[in-house]
Each structure stands twice: as structure tokens, then as C-alpha cells.
Amino acid sequence: MTFVEKPPHADPVRMRHITDEALLEELGADGVAQARPWRRRAPVWPEPQPQDVAEADRLIGIEVDFLDKGHGRSRLYGFHYLRWMMPLVSAYAQTGDPRYAREWDRLFRQWYAGRDQVEGDWPGLDVVWYSLGVASRSMHVSRALAVFATEPAISDECWLQMMKTILGGARWAAEEHDEFRHGNWQFATACELLHLARVFADFPESGQWAEVARARILEHLERDVRDDGGHHERSPGYHGMCLGGVQRAASVDPDLIGHPRFRAMHDWLASLTTSGGWVPHLQDSGVVWPAEMLRTGERLLGEPVRPVEGSHLLESSAYAIFRAGDLHTVINYGPYIGHELEPHSHHAALDFVLSGWGVPLAWEAGGPPSYDDPGYYDWYQATRGHNTLLVPGEDYIEDRKAALDLFHAGEHVDAFAGHHHGYRARHDRRIVFVRSEPSYWLVTDEIDAEAIWLLHGTSPWIQHGDGYASSRGPGLLVVPTEPPDDVVLGTGPARIPDQATATAAYGEIHSLGLRRRDGRFAVALFPFEERPPEVRVSGSEIRVDGVTDTFSAHGWARDGLAERWGGDE
């Protein structure tokens, strides 16, 4: 059997089934009454949210089958993190109503009694005793212990079981992670282990936990965080998970704050934040709303965290960013990255997302609701869910050898050029962003194969003049310089951010596919807030809003202005 972590080592006595007597001995107490007021530091946790009260009310009296594989192959693991129970803790913190504590007591004791019987379908991976499960449960249970500390509705039995969960989990994590290995699993678990070691400092083993955890965290900051501050998997969601863990660790171990990668991880997230306050769901990510995390970073760092002004590269993460006013562009030219279990990288390169006026303009499939989703492989991870070229009938190669050929951040225009080898033929793409208003993008592609040029918007596409426009604004007018051989339309699900509520529910995105047999494309993208602009696109000349722009292979000109981005004409 292949193990993604160490072979099973959940000791039946020290971890899995700690006796009451053994726990009380660790605490230096003669009985539960003496042990329950045991002093410890309060865990670090976000502020309770008002909506948690309604969520907690829905949990009152529910019947739960903790062994039910109907949760899904991956979701079963996440279900045993117990995060879904946390509204009970938040509701109690806000109201003091003991019925939320009683419900936690009932559900937790049910989970504890049946945890040895749960079986997962990932080979060699225990549902309960694996890194993210141990780390996540420890985080939630430590919060519950603090909030319910003096509540009589929490029985002695439940209190002991929660403490055993903390103690056994910390022992397991310290043993599991006694040497470095890449990935968000170890990084997040080491951060929580250090947090537990400081919060539960009176456990005799806490010093050893802290030593192991600090060593791993420092290794991850050096070896698992890129020079530009991005986590090596290049996913904003998993970056945020790791940064949140480091923040929790640094809150109880401030020496970590001085590490340069600690600051860089915040800068990376700020650079990807759009004017709408969200970070795009690149790779297997959800839409990230980083405001609270960045405020926590500012509090810890003692100084503001601000995005880099203007257009720039996140060079070691292989993302190019164009930024001008409300308009924000992210271009992916990075590699396919491995992972402990399944890679979170998507089968696309030189793809891009665009935003403006607080909404997505050109969007992508992003991450799935669950890794059990039937569309995970053929939509969310697939090339067809991204804004790039699709070669019909060819499989996309994971080792795509994507590369940056040019980046120019100019006064009037920004330019990006790159290539990749995801198909048999090399794909070259150039994206020029005209910063000077009226602003727009010109995307040029070449591949020696019949290909479909793909773009996804948040509303249906309608024909508009020589191009295609979003049926509602804000949106894009898409105008090819030469008509395609065929137009292909489609739809698919994706999270769509809502700036007003700071949420991103799943909705429908709309695919526009321009097919050409010669694999040559030049397409202009004009953003509009309410109505598409009147434009004329002809060869190397683009006329929009009364101005005329002329493009060459390495330059742009408008009404006496000119700018070059390198190379010979």
C-alpha cells in the first residue's frame, strides 16, 4: 500500500485511547473538578459572526451519521474536521445560551465514540489520524474548550474527550512531522502544533511539540514559500490557509514575525487583490476575501500591508499582474505543481482573468465545491474552463514548460509575452494592456494547430458589430481582427464574487470560443461599465472612443504618443 504520510502510527494508548487517569496525571490534577479550571492561554480565533447563530439553530437536534460515506470520498475527511459544528461555539460566545453547549456536548461525544469505526476510501489515509484532520480538529476543539470553559452544560465526559483529542492529536502531529516534506498539509499542521504548544503550555510535552513545530515552520518559510511570498502550490486559497496558520503561530510565538517571508506572504496576497476586494480563484482555490487576514497581518507586523503599485511580476510564483485604476489583470505562466495527494494545479497556461468596477470581466472555472464533484477533472481543472487556447482532440501535458518571454510595465502600455508546450505544438501568447484611457487589452496567439480561443464571462455573449459583447455590464466587448472560422458557445459553473456581501456563490459563466484552423488569433477586449463602446478593429489599427491606436510587433502609438516594449521591428 502507498502512503501519502507515514505508515499508521496512532498509538492506541498515547494517542487514540488516552485514559482519564493518564490525562489527569498529565495535567497534574487529582480529579476532573480540579482539572477543568486548568489555566491555559486563550487560543487565537476570528471574531464570532452574527450569522453563526442562525447556523447553530439549524444544528439543534440533528441526527448525524459520522460513518456515512454518502458525504463523498474527500468530503468525508473534511466532515471529520468538525468545522460544521463551530457555529454552536460562536453562537454560545455571542448569546451565552447553554442549549448550544448542550448540543456541542451531544454531538462531540457521539463523534468521539464512533471515530474508530469511520473508514475512508483514499488508500492508506486514515480519516481521523491524518495531518489536516488532526490540525483542523485541534484548532476547533481548542476554541470550544476556551469558550465553554465554565459552562456547566458541558459534561465532564465531553471535557475529558476534548482534552484527549488535543493531547493525542499533538502527540501524533509531533511524531508525524519530525522531518520536512513539501506541501500545505505539513505547513498548516506544524503551525497549529506550535499554537497548541503555547496555548497548552502546561502539558509536559509542550516544549518538545514547540521544538518540532518551529523547526518545520522555519523550513517551510524557507523552502515552501517562494521568494515573492507565494506558497509553492500557487493557489490563493491554500496560500491563505498556510498564512492563516503562520499568523496563529506568530500570535503566540512573535519571533516568527521577523522572518522576511512572513511579510512577503502578506504582500503576495495584497498584490493579487482586485479593486473589488477579492483575490481570483486561481488553480484549486476558492475566491479569497483577504481583508481580515491582511488586517491581522498589519496588527502583527505593526505596519500597513499595501499592494505593489502599478503592474509587476510575482516572478517566482509565475503570475503577471497589470493594474491601472479599477482594472486588474492576472496572467498565469507557471508550472504544474505536485501535491501530497492530488495536485491543485490546473491544465492551463498563459490563461488570464480580468476584473473591473468590482466584478469579474473575464472569469474562469476556479476551484470546485468539493473534490468529489463530477466536473472536477473535465471542467474545473480542464483547459476548457480557462481563458486560453484549446486544441481539440489533444490531451494537455502536465509538464508544460511554461515560460515568460517578455514583461514590460510602461507609462502608457503594459506588455506580456510567454509560451508553453502543453500541446504537441508550441503555443505563443502576447497580451498588451493599453493603460492610457480608453483602456483595453489586445491578445495575440499563435500555435501550429487548429485551435479554439476561449474566453469566459459572467453573462451570455451576444453579437455586437464585428464582435461579441457581454449581454449586461460591467462586461467586455470582444472583437477579433479577423473573423473566426466558427464560434462555439457554452456554459459552466464557477464561484462569482459579490463585492456587496463579500461572498462568492456558485453561478453560471458563459464560454465564447473562436475557432481557427490556422491557429492564429488577434483579439481586442474592451471593458465597459454599462454599454459596449463603438470600435473599429482593422489589422494593426484599433479605433475606440475617437482615438486611433497603431500596433507593431514591439510597439504602440496614439496621437503623438508612442511606447516600445523591446525587440527589433
Image: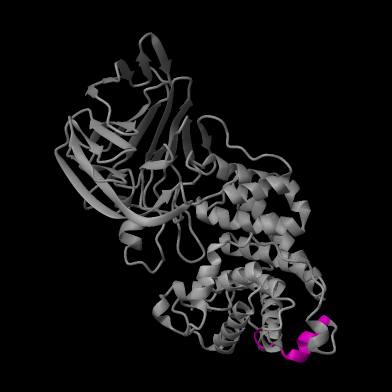
Which of the image's four quarters has the C terminus? top left
**As rendered, which of 501 and 86 lies closer to the eye?**
501
Residue 129 shows in the view = yes
x and y, in percent, of residue 432 in the image: 38, 28
Residue beneath the point at 43% across and 49% down? 498
Residue beneath the point at 74% across and 78% down? 150
Is 545 placed left or right of 26 in the picture?
left
**As rendered, which of 430 and 549 lies closer to the eye?**
549
Residue beneath the point at 45% across and 58% down? 344
Residue 462's place in the image compared with 43, above or below, is above
Is 250 placed left or right of 411 in the picture?
right
Stretch in magenta: 16-27
Extreme-left residue of the structure: 485
Residue 228 shows in the view = no
In the rendered structure, does residue 245 fall within the stretch colored magenta?
Answer: no
Quarter of the image where one finds residue 143: bottom right
x and y, in percent, of residue 240 in the image: 56, 54
Residue 241's place in the image compared with 514, above or below, is below
Colour scheme of the rendered structure: one colour
**As rendered, which of 4 and 534 lies closer to the eye?**
534
Extreme-top residue of the structure: 560
In the rendered structure, does residue 24 fall within the stretch colored magenta?
Answer: yes
The rendered magenta stretch, by its main secondary structure, is classed as helix
x and y, in percent, of residue 48 in the image: 61, 62
Is 296 placed left or right of 80 in the picture?
right
Q: How many marks?
A: 0
Quarter of the image where one finds residue 389: top left
x and y, in percent, of residue 350 in the image: 38, 41
